Image: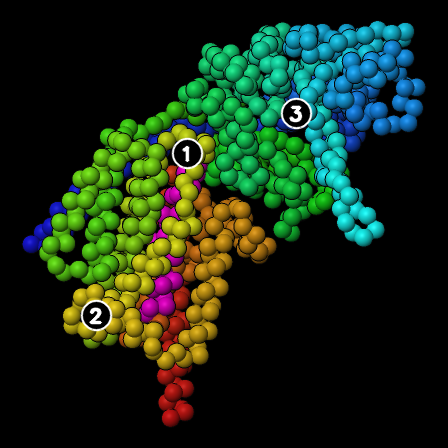
Amino acid sequence: MKLKIDKIVLVLISLSLLVGIYTVYQRVEIEKQYKTAEIILDYSEMKKFADSSEEDLDWWLREFKKYGAESVAVPEETVKLLIESGKPLRAEIVSEMIKNYNWQNDYNEQISVMVDEGVIKNNDVLITTRDESLFDYLNSGLTERYDNEFFDTYHMNDDYYIVLKGTNDDIYYSDIQKVWDLEGKGVYESKIVADSRLLNIGIGYDEEKINLIKDSGLDVILRPINFPTYNEKLTDVYISANEKYDLKPRIYLLGSKEVLGYPENEQSLLDYVKENNIAIALIENSTQREHLDGKGLNKLVEKSGYSAMRVFTMWDYIRERNKYYNYEGAEEIENTMFRAITERNIRAIYFKPFFEEQKSAKYLTDAEEYERTFSSLESRLSEHNIKLGKAESMKEFHVGSKRLSVLAFGITLAAVLLFIKMFNIKDSRASYLYLFAVPAAFIPLVARGIAEKGFAFAAAVIFSGLGIYFYIIQIKKIYVDTKKYSFINIISYSTLILTGAVIISLAGAIFLDAMLADVKYFLEMDIFRGVKFAQILPFGIFLVMFIIYFMNKEEDESVKSVVKTTARFLNKEVKIYYGIIVGIIGAAAYIYISRTGHETNVQPSSIEMISRNFMEYVLLARPRTKEFLIAFPAIFAAVYAAGKKSEFFTGIFMLAAAMGTSSIVNTFSHLRTPIYLSLARTVIALGFGIVVGVIAVIIMDVLHKIYLRLQERFK
């Protein structure tokens, strides 16, 4: 009866899995349409780069157009940018200006009186110029964008003055300055004023810059700046600027800490984005996870119907990787861009020129190296059916709650199955536990947000556990069998056992990806958390099953006998080499968990990175090292040890193999990575793992024969 129920449960899980497979298939079809990556040049960096070279900016823009660049991002002009570009302009924060001795000598007497009387306040910014055309440009830009109450203008003698009226919120501070007396007692603390937002608000666009870019054949992407205090006109100005310069906006790049119109006036931008099918840029964090936060950004993306794309910006630490890892040129920077596009759903590179070397602000101005980099990048991307060109936003995709209910039903059935098998429960009444799958199926209908991640996490742990159960049971059969296993037998059984465990783990990956098959996860606006915990739990599941199925010598297989076995195990005499092995396993486990993600300080060595890079060049996808070098061959080693009736080494190798089942599901937990790439990575790891496993068995057999000879010699 129990066997019949198990078969029914497996059929129901398989039917639920088919729904998951169909969902994943739909996602793959969307990914197939998302096959163009765009190179966006940063104008400010390109200008500095050109100034440091022997060629002008126009020459470089045309060169990068040949390399595959499609567009240039032009920031809105600010007072600070105008000063940095050498315009005849002075701007000072009043609170800092009045600290200077005889500051009045630099200003008209009437301005001094206005400051003294508080008409011009400490948080204001005072702008001065004698260039009438520059004043007109500033005045026109301010009038077009902001309310008249925000600024005042004056013309006194030969000087033009503009006063931007600020508040405490507009002042930026650096470190707090602390003052102590001779006895080391604190006297006071003061904030050091570093900047003002008023120096960084949008004023206008430079027509010469825009025309230069257009003449080079590249598209212009304007980066408008929001100012929360006065934001009513800003979207209209952005729209009119695109019309004025005859630009067809395709991508909206945040130019400030908020979207245009934030707060309360974002609707105009939303309407413009939807009418023109503009892709909203989500710039990836430096940790290569989620994106840089901007107030109102997520809401804008959601209301636009997820008309967005992920963008990778060239952080300085990446630009320094010229001649890195023993490369002759910028190959590692190329690798970084390649991984971003192929592995992380990045569809635009916000490009900044390379530096000569680490911790150097000197630009690499070798045109041949840039040409080689982009030529190689384009060639490698073509193997993934990706081309350089004009990128588009990702298609909106969501899964209905009813479909999630079917998936939750199957995952819950699998959870009960694992529970029964893990504790080897023989009581037929345990089958009633499967009824819990019925109420579980309703959870996505009433609490979708919790259900998505909760059941995804459960699938990651449960199917990893079922994979462990599968190989433990199969290896146990070999362990208790009295017949001798030949080399061919060991290799054959090991391959079948490993393949079976991998397939079961892949089923968990399908359930996980189907539960989280939503565009918000593809764009990494939301992420699957608990990845590390999902990798730790299977080891606990393994230990329970190893105690029950390998160490429990009681005929009675009740919970009481398991407790006795555990107590006996804890009281067992420990040999020194056991302790050494456990210590090595503990260190490996720490590195294994710490290496998950990009936030950790435990990073791959240079040798490992060089080998990874090599595999990326020669393979469609780089297999995970811990799978094909450790976990998968460990199955072969465990089968060999089981054939030799070594309980300790069988257990140790099976413990290492547990890393593989969780790692497979973890591979698919990176929802931004295309499904085909995760699948290729797993299949390649399986193939390599079998090869390494065969080698491991050969080595173990040689060592075992040497050990037996030594035993005979020292008898």
The kind of secondary structure element at disc 3 is helix
Q: Pointer 2: residues within 10 angstroms few (<14), some, or many (20+)?
A: some
The amino acid on which the numbered mark 1 sits, given as a three-letter code, is Tyr
Q: Which residue is mark 3?
A: 169
Which image quadrant is residue 352 in?
top right
Which of the image's four quarters has the C terminus?
bottom left
Stretch of the chain drawn in magenta = 650-673
- Residue found at x 33% / y 37%: 450
The amino acid on which the numbered mark 2 sits, given as a three-letter code, is Ser
Q: CA distance from mark 3 to mark 2?
A: 68 Å
Give the side of residue 77 with respect to residue 242, left or right: right
- Residue found at x 71% / y 7%: 140
Q: Which residue is mark 1?
A: 521
- Position of 501 relative to 48 (above/below): below
Residue 632 lies, in percent from the top left, at 37, 58
Which of discs 3 and 2 lies nearer the camera? The answer is 3
Q: Which mark is residue 53?
A: none
The kind of secondary structure element at disc 1 is helix
Which of discs 2 and 1 lies nearer the camera? The answer is 2
Q: Is residue 671 magenta?
A: yes
The amino acid on which the numbered mark 3 sits, given as a three-letter code, is Asp
Q: Is residue 607 magenta?
A: no
Which of discs 3 and 1 lies nearer the camera? The answer is 3
Give the side of residue 162 with respect to residue 476, left or right: right
Q: Nearer the viewer, residue 127 or 89?
A: 127
Which of the image's four quarters has the N terminus?
bottom left
Residue 416 lies, in percent from the top left, at 21, 50
What secondary structure is the magenta-colored segment mainly?
helix
Q: Which residue is mark 2?
A: 561
- Position of 252 relative to 512 (above/below): above
Dot 3 or dot 2, earlier in sequence: 3
